[in-house]
Amino acid sequence: MGDVYGGAFATIGRCWKQLFGMALAVYGGAAALFAGVVALAYAAVSDHVDVLVHASAYEDPPWEDIRPLIVAFVCAWLIGVAVMVLAQALLSAACPAVLQDAVIGRRVTFGAVWRRAWGRLPAVLGAVLLGNLAVCAVPLILWGTGIGLLMTGAATQNGATAAWALLPLLLLLFAAVPLSIWLWVKFLFAPTAAVMERQGPVAALRRSSQLVRGDWWRIFGISLLAWIMAAAAAYIIQLPFSFATMLPGSVVDADASPAQAVAAMAVGLITFVIGSLIGQIAAAIFPQLVNSLLYVDQRIRKENLAPALAQAAAQHAPAG
């Protein structure tokens, strides 16, 4: 564990420009794209917003003006989720791309990392979506089965039967969580395999399952601790931004006009987005590097990759 974490921190120290530059480009581009979507949504419903802004503090706004705002908000939110999924997949491809050169001592450039990550984005995105679908589908199927049993017992109008039907539901709920965690670890190396071995989405999932087999608990412990460390660092970074987010709302009293409330909400939202962006960068890079190093470690243990890495490193070592 110490070697893996040490390697991750060493990679960050050596390639911080490429890693953080890639993260800023990815998440900054996603934020800019989302801002454009919000601007388009606002342009589409600006007339309704004006009606609400110019309404008095004690006037109930009409539903005809509220409904378009709800529709615009939901559409913008869905697009924002899709953009963030793409950004996360691109960063999941960038970290192995950086490590692929760094592990053998090859010079890492931002352009090379961007081209490699962008070229493998479809495969990484497919692997991430299929892996998350498998992880999420299992508890949904189990919960659906349990709810069906519960409804069947309730349909009999027999209290004792309904109570007995509730027991399998609870058991299925408890079984779904460890099964989802088990699948999550099994598919942990899929993005790295898609980049380093140029595997397709399904082949990357199979490759990850093959490498994890026999070392599930070790990989789970090291990866889980890396996520906890990254989440703690992101929380510490976002904490001052969270306080700053609440400040605009605290200065608006109960008798404020809708315009003042909207302005306070906009300032708070911008502050929240900036804090979330910085925290997301801190939380995303370290676990991805740890997972990529665990992938390399598993290949060294199971496939004797060390001689090939040593030979490649010797070829790229500086002369003299």
Image (cartoon, rainbow, N blue to C red):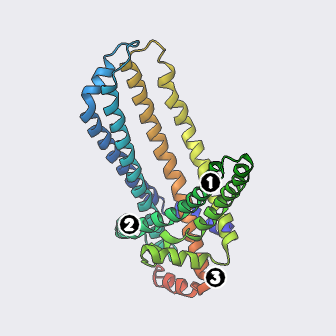
Residue drawn at (52%, 46%) of the image: 279
Sequence-first tag of 2 and 3: 2
Residue behind mark 2: 121
Sequence-first tag of 2 and 1: 2
Residue drawn at (24%, 26%) of the image: 47
In the picture shown, does residue 151 fall above or below 213? above
SS at badge 3? helix
Q: Position of residue 312 (x, y in %)?
A: 49, 84
Q: Nearer the viewer, mark 2 or mark 1?
A: 1
Q: Residues within 10 Å of mark 3 (few under 14, many from 20)?
A: few
SS at badge 2? helix
Report the amino acid beneath label 3.
Arg
Q: Nearer the viewer, residue 257 or 93?
A: 257
> Could you tell me how far apart the alpha carbons at marks 3 and 1 are, in whole angstroms?
51 Å
Q: Position of residue 57 (x, y in %)?
A: 40, 13
Residue behind mark 3: 301
Residue behind mark 1: 152
Report the amino acid beneath label 2.
Leu
Q: Position of residue 241 (x, y in %)?
A: 52, 36
Q: Position of 32 compared to 238: left or right?
A: left
In the picture shown, does residue 56 fall above or below 303? above
Q: Is residue 14 visible?
A: no
Sequence-first tag of 3 and 1: 1
